[in-house]
């Protein structure tokens, strides 16, 4: 009997010890994150205290819990991450960004829900954001600022991977920095004011490289590139159902040898309004492969002083030139497959299909003295010019 009691006591002690070890187990950083040391925290205030004293290489890991109001700053070289298997939620506590990343900082596995300011702010040329979702930002979901522009050297890059941005005033805003975004989405952004309700905005010498990113159903333009030194590469993107233009490039200053913008892979621009892919005073655009299709007509006041149904697949306006479309399919666009108005030298259409039905026009070239290279079978010749709506779209100042 005494032996049986001792056995029960030993078993109880073992269970208690196991329970203690389980509750005291250190939080684990997510897979793919390297840490020189790991500090476990339980909420936003606790995280901020630990982050304030963290040194480069440290991972501050959040073990989970209820949604936490926060305005968190991650120092240089420090990682702030969800614990392995956790999916913590932060909410905006003020008009300050919910999370601000210093140079070389990382944010991994966090959900952000905010109704006032920026979701994630990056100030500097390097940072990483991975497996993060942001909804409801009253400003940009992600805002990146590097001033003056700092897209060189090659490692001066803010990397976004599997980042999802939705239902904010704006998705990604980049000024002067190089952002490389692989996989993810920017969708359903809307604004009740005069601000740009765009999926992606790059300005002031920024470079944006998007690979496998979906930009969809935004109240404004899908992707806006603005400025002489601004540019990027879009590969395998899907830009669909945006209420204004799909992609709009204005004031770019490149050449065919050194393009400002390359669009490649299986990129698709579909069911956007007014213009699928357009440029104003834009030079140096190369578009290889992919499709521009089903651009929707929208009643728009044109330069002819009247409201017209405008829905063109490609639109090149206001001295745009050095543009090459190679093997790009243009189909089902409501008004014209492509419209070149007041174009300049170096506009080339080669290969690709131009498919129209009913009263849809093929490629229209008007008010242009320079030769546009395009197969004659793909040209619609009109007796008089059609109306154009090609404004310089406004940009915004999100971070200062």
Image (tube, rainbow, N blue to C red):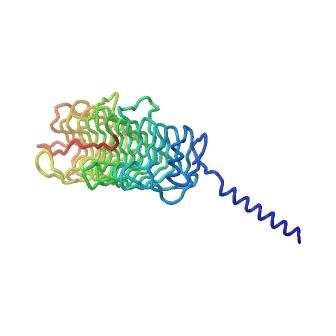
Q: Quadrant of the N terminus?
A: bottom right
Which of these two is toward me, 134 or 210? 134
Vertically, is 324 above or below 238? above
Q: Quadrant of the C terminus?
A: top left
- Identify the image quadrant of residue 135: bottom left
Residue 307 in the image, given as x and y percentages of width and height: 14, 52
Left or right: where does residue 196 sit relative to residue 86? left
Q: Total of numbered circles in the picture? A: 0
Residue 319 in the image, given as x and y percentages of width and height: 21, 34
The structure residue drawn at horizontal position 42% and vertical position 52%, both measured from the top left corner, is 134
Left or right: where does residue 72 sit relative to residue 27? left
Which of these two is toward me, 377 or 236? 236
Vertically, is 240 above or below 351? below
* Residue 312 seen in this snapshot: yes
Which of these two is toward me, 283 or 133? 133
Residue 88 in the image, given as x and y percentages of width and height: 51, 55
The structure residue drawn at horizontal position 23% and vertical position 30%, both measured from the top left corner, is 345
* Residue 363 seen in this snapshot: no
The structure residue drawn at horizontal position 16% and vertical position 39%, both measured from the top left corner, is 366
Vertically, is 61 above or below 19? above
Residue 89 in the image, given as x and y percentages of width and height: 48, 56
The structure residue drawn at horizontal position 33% and vertical position 31%, both measured from the top left corner, is 259
Which of these two is toward me, 84 or 370? 84
């Amino acid at each position: 009997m005494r032996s049986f009691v001792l056995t029960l006591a030993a078993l109880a002690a073992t269970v208690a010890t196991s329970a203690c070890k389980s509750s005291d187990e250190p939080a684990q950083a997510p897979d793919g994150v390297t840490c020189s040391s790991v500090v476990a925290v339980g909420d936003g205030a606790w995280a901020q205290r630990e982050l304030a004293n963290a040194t480069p290489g440290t991972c501050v890991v959040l073990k989970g819990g209820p949604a936490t109001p926060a305005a968190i700053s991650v120092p240089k070289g420090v990682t702030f991450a969800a614990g392995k298997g956790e999916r913590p939620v932060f909410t905006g506590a003020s008009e300050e960004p919910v999370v601000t990343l210093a140079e070389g900082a990382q944010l991994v596995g966090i959900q952000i829900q905010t109704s006032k300011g920026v979701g994630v702010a990056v100030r500097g040329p390097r940072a990483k954001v991975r497996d993060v979702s942001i909804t409801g930002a009253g400003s940009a979901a992600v805002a990146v600022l590097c001033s003056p522009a700092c897209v060189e050297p090659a490692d001066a890059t803010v990397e976004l991977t599997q980042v999802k941005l939705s239902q904010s005033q704006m998705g990604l805003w980049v000024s002067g920095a190089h952002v490389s975004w692989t996989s993810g989405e920017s969708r359903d952004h809307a604004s009740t004011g005069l601000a740009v309700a765009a999926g992606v905005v790059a300005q002031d010498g920024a470079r944006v490289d998007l690979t496998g990113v979906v930009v969809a159903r935004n109240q404004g333009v899908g992707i806006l590139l603005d400025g002489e030194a601004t540019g990027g590469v879009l590969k395998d993107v899907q830009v669909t159902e945006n209420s204004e233009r799909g992609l709009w490039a204005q004031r770019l200053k490149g050449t065919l040898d050194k393009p400002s913008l390359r669009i490649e892979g299986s990129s698709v621009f579909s069911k956007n309004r007014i213009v699928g892919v357009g440029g104003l005073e834009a030079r140096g655009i190369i578009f290889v492969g992919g499709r521009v299709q089903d651009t929707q007509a929208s009643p728009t006041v044109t330069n002819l002083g009247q409201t017209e149904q405008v829905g063109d697949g490609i639109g090149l306006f206001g001295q745009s030139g050095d543009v090459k479309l190679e093997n790009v399919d243009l189909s089902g666009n409501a008004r014209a497959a492509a419209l070149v108005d007041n174009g300049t030298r170096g506009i080339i259409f080669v290969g690709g299909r131009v498919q129209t039905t009913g009263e849809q026009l093929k490629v229209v070239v008007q008010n242009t003295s320079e030769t546009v290279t395009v197969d004659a079978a793909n040209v619609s010749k009109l007796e008089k010019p059609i109306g154009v709506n090609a404004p310089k779209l406004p940009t915004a100042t999100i971070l200062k």
